[in-house]
Image (cartoon, rainbow, N blue to C red):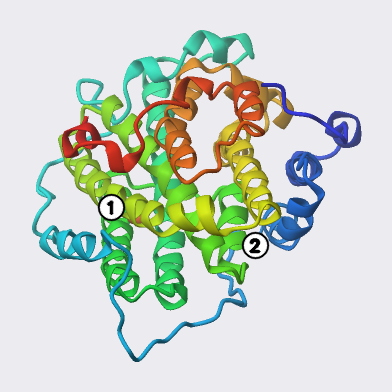
Amino acid sequence: MQIPSFVDSNRIVANLPQPVRVRVEAWVDNLNVLLSLHNPRVMSRMAPAAIRGLLLRRGRRPTSLRARHRTFLDFDFPDGLPGLKALYDKAKRLQWNGDTDLPWDISVDPMNPEVPIISKEFIEWSVIEDFGVRMNAVERQAFSNRVASWMLSQFLHGEQGALMAAAQVTEATTDFDGKLYGATQVMDEARHVEVFRRYLDEKLGRRYEINDNLYTIIDSLMTDGRWDMKFLGMQILVEGLALGAFAALRRMTKEPLLDQLLRRVIHDEARHVQFGLLSLRDLYTKQLSEKERIEREDWAFEIVVLMRNRFLAHELYEEGFAHRMSRRQWNRLMEDMPGMNLFRRQMFRRLVPNLRTIGLLTERMRPHYARIGLDAYFFLPATDEMSAQDFAA
Ligand SMILES: [Fe+2]
Ligand SMILES: [Fe+2]
């Protein structure tokens, strides 16, 4: 899908020295993302996070945000929603230890072509050559590894967002069993941060900054005062995308430690998505007014578009390609890359059916999702209709 361009960066940046050009290009490109948000209500809600994330690029340094949600307390300790107690019991049973339950003694050599971190088919070299960049076998292997490190770095950053969001959700939920379950999720997310960080630092030796779009989404839901938006943003959208992304990477990797790490994380994430489905299904299908539901439908769609079109590995561009092509050319290269495209589509396999099951994939929204090519997933099973084997597959 062609990304709309409201401001022409090519004309603005021509003749600027490269470091300045890279910064201006990023700024203009991100401004176009902000201007591409369709719904004015959603745009005004997301604007502060988008300004911090896309224009000020706050994800690139330590940052603090003012939370606006209310902490809910109930000293009667009432029973929670059906299913949440069972999910809490399951989460307690399935806790694992990132230190002792993964084979860290496996020696990982990212430059060994026999055991690739991501499969060779993922990168279509002829597409890169079409843009005038030629690489020999060693350079190709090194580039593949950078792509893998970039991807795993974004997983790590998403996990940090999930850790903080899970803590907020635990405070804000009005369901007492939800609070108990939420505590297990906080522990799960801490473990995910631990294992992704360790894998990147010890095995791949390279970490990338957070993608500006991912930062914007995390910022937006951390600062939204409405508890259900945190559930929708983190438990359904970010975690749903993560489930698809982890499963896609797991299918691509031949590296056994990463395979086992992803398998364990995927099982935890499936519970987290289920928590979101259990918490939101009744609220969204029976209790919200039409106006409130429409706002959530639109917000979810904008996030989907942001992730579908904008997960373009700009951190890799700024590291090694800015002197070879413009950011706009890089965007086209990433859009044309079949492996990247397949990966982006896989991310939505798990998410789209979950939107259906909580009532946000309405007749009004289906043409919009179809327009961005996600109609193939409308009727796949939702996360809580899948078996444990399905997740591991
Ligand atoms: Fe996680
Ligand atoms: Fe999670």
Q: In which quarter of the image is residue 312?
A: top right
Disc 1 to disc 2, C-alpha distance? 31 Å
Which badge, 1 or 2, is on the more N-terminal residue?
2
Looking at the rendered structure, the kind of residue marked 1 is Arg
Q: In this view, does 389 lie above or below 280?
A: above
- Say whether mark 1 is within 8 Å of ligand 2: no
- Say whether mark 2 is within 8 Å of ligand 1: no
Residue lying at the far bottom in this picture: please name it: 75
Q: How far across and down, in percent of the image, does residue 10 sit? A: 85, 29
Point out the image quarter for the C terminus. top left
| Helix, strand or loop for disc 1 | helix
Q: How far across and down, in percent of the image, does residue 329 sit? A: 70, 23
Q: In which quarter of the image is residue 220?
A: bottom right
Front-most of residues 317 and 194? 194
Point out the image quarter for the N terminus. top right
Res 320 visible:
yes
Report the residue marked by disc 2. Answer: 58
Report the residue marked by disc 1. Answer: 271
Front-most of residues 356 and 143? 356
Label 2: how many Cα within 10 Å (few below 14, some 14–19, many 20+): many
Q: Is residue 255 left or right of residue 147?
A: left
